Amino acid sequence: MKKVLLEVCCGSADDVIEAWRAGADRVELNSDLFHGGLTPTVGALRVAKRETGMRIMTMVRPREGGFCYTDGEFATALEDARVLLDNGADGLVFGFLHENGTVDVERTGALADLALSRGKEAVFHRAIDVVPDWCEALDRLIALGVTRVLTSGQEPDVSLGTDTVREMIAYAAGRIEILPGAGITLRNMDRIISATGCDQIHLAAHRTLSDMSTSNNSAIFYGSCLYPPEDRFSVTDRDTVSKIAGRLKENLI
């Protein structure tokens, strides 16, 4: 049976350490997995690298909710990418789309060139799963020299997208790596590998731990327990802030 590489999706340095201890081959390091994974801190990367020495792909995603970013968000992504590479990242994971869902070749190329110029890997994440034409998207990514694509086969769960993943692998024909992920478990892993013919998989596996430091006041909450819509995000209300600033300047408060 062929060797299948295991990549584990991690949300912290502790996650990486646990994945390393469990025998993972590679990890993808994020922050905020609740929102699908955002750019991790440099501290998390440095600790994870120091404690494990394993191959760490770092997410570069400046906010939740889509993949068409403002100029400021993209500038932030570039700065984060440089710092992450400077601090030991073995590859960058990113995805940039236009509003119509097609690959933003210019921005994708900038991140790919940054990683590849340092001998690191460039990985296009599951933004591929919302493009209107995955064949066209793969062609563009191949032309840019992107190392790998993470995909669920354009389905919510890769177990539903095995036919598409298999077609992607055949279409890529070794020109770009296809990494299936999303919903892979111990129970369905063998079937997904067999059905797709893949040589690597990406999965997340978590358990719940307790932190009793908040138990003195169970009425206090620090966040939301609602599942956020993937097509919305928050931005500062310029008008409201302008009004507040104006009031402060006029000493009306």
Image (tube, helix red, strand yellow):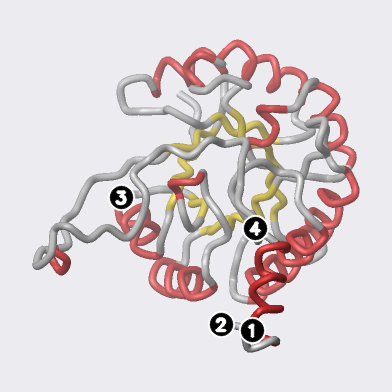
In percent of width and height, residue 169 lies at 68, 22
How many discs appear?
A: 4
First-in-chain label (4 vs 2): 4
Q: Amino acid at mark 3?
A: Ala
Residue 84 position within the rendered picture, expressed as x and y whole percent measured from the top left: 63, 69
Amino acid residing under circle 2 = Ile
Which of pointers 2 and 1 lies earlier in the amino acid sequence? 1
Q: Which residue is mark 1?
A: 248
Residue under the image location 11 percent in, 63 percent down: 215
Q: Earlier in the sequence, mark 4 or mark 1?
A: 4
* Badge 3 density bin: few <14, some 14–19, many ≥20, Cα 10 Å: few
Position in image of residue 176 (x %, y %): 75, 35
Q: Are marks 2 and 1 in contact (CB under 8 Å)?
A: yes
Q: Residue at x 69, y 14 (%)?
A: 167
In the rendered structure, which amino acid carries the disc numbered 1?
Answer: Leu
Residue linked to disc 3: 22
Disc 4 and disc 2 in contact, CB within 8 angstroms: no
Q: Nearer the viewer, residue 194 or 30?
A: 30
Mark 4–mark 1 contact, CB under 8 Å?
no
Q: Residue at x 48, y 58 (%)?
A: 31
What whole-number distance in Å separates the C-alpha atoms at marks 4 and 1?
Answer: 31 Å
Q: Could you tell whether 136 is left or right of 24 in the image?
A: right
Residue 253, label in figure:
2
Q: Secondary structure at mark 4?
A: loop
- What residue is disc 4 on? 62
